[in-house]
Amino acid sequence: MLESVELPLPSWVEHEIYESDGFKNHLLEDAADKDAMAAEDAAEYRRELRAGL
């Protein structure tokens, strides 16, 4: 069973990714959304810890 396999992308795909502003913006927005969700999860965890004390 394979856990995770990373294969190199063809060079033309890498070029399109690196040159695409829309793709870069999508990645940045996705990362910002994930950061916001992680921050909210951490805040909720702290609230639950305080409520349990």
Image (tube, rainbow, N blue to C red):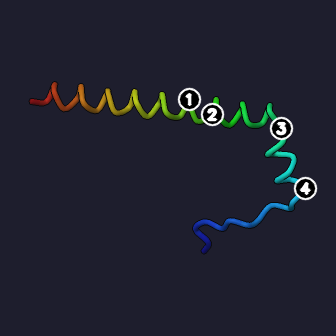
**Circles 2 and 3: CB distance less than 8 Å?**
no
- Is label 2 or label 4 in front? 4
Spatial CA span between label 4 and label 1: 28 Å
Q: Which amino acid is tagged 1?
A: Asp
- Is label 1 or label 3 in front? 3
Q: Residue at x 16, y 27 (%)?
A: 50
Spatial CA span between label 1 and label 3: 20 Å
State the mark number for residue 11: none
Residue on which the image places disc 2: 30
Q: Earlier in the sequence, mark 2 or mark 3?
A: 3
Density class for disc 2 (Cα within 10 Å; few <14, some 14-19, many ≥20) is: few
- Is label 2 or label 3 in front? 3
Residue on which the image places disc 1: 33
Residue on which the image places disc 4: 12
Spatial CA span between label 2 and label 4: 23 Å
Q: Secondary structure at mark 3?
A: loop
Q: Secondary structure at mark 1?
A: helix
Density class for disc 3 (Cα within 10 Å; few <14, some 14-19, many ≥20) is: few
Q: Which amino acid is tagged 2?
A: Asp
Q: Residue at x 63, y 33 (%)?
A: 30
Density class for disc 1 (Cα within 10 Å; few <14, some 14-19, many ≥20) is: few
Q: Estimate the x, y position of residue 10 in percent, counting from the top left.
A: 86, 62
Q: Earlier in the sequence, mark 1 or mark 3?
A: 3
Q: Which amino acid is tagged 4?
A: Trp
Q: Which amino acid is tagged 3?
A: Ser
- Count the labels in the image: 4
**Circles 2 and 1: CB distance less than 8 Å?**
yes
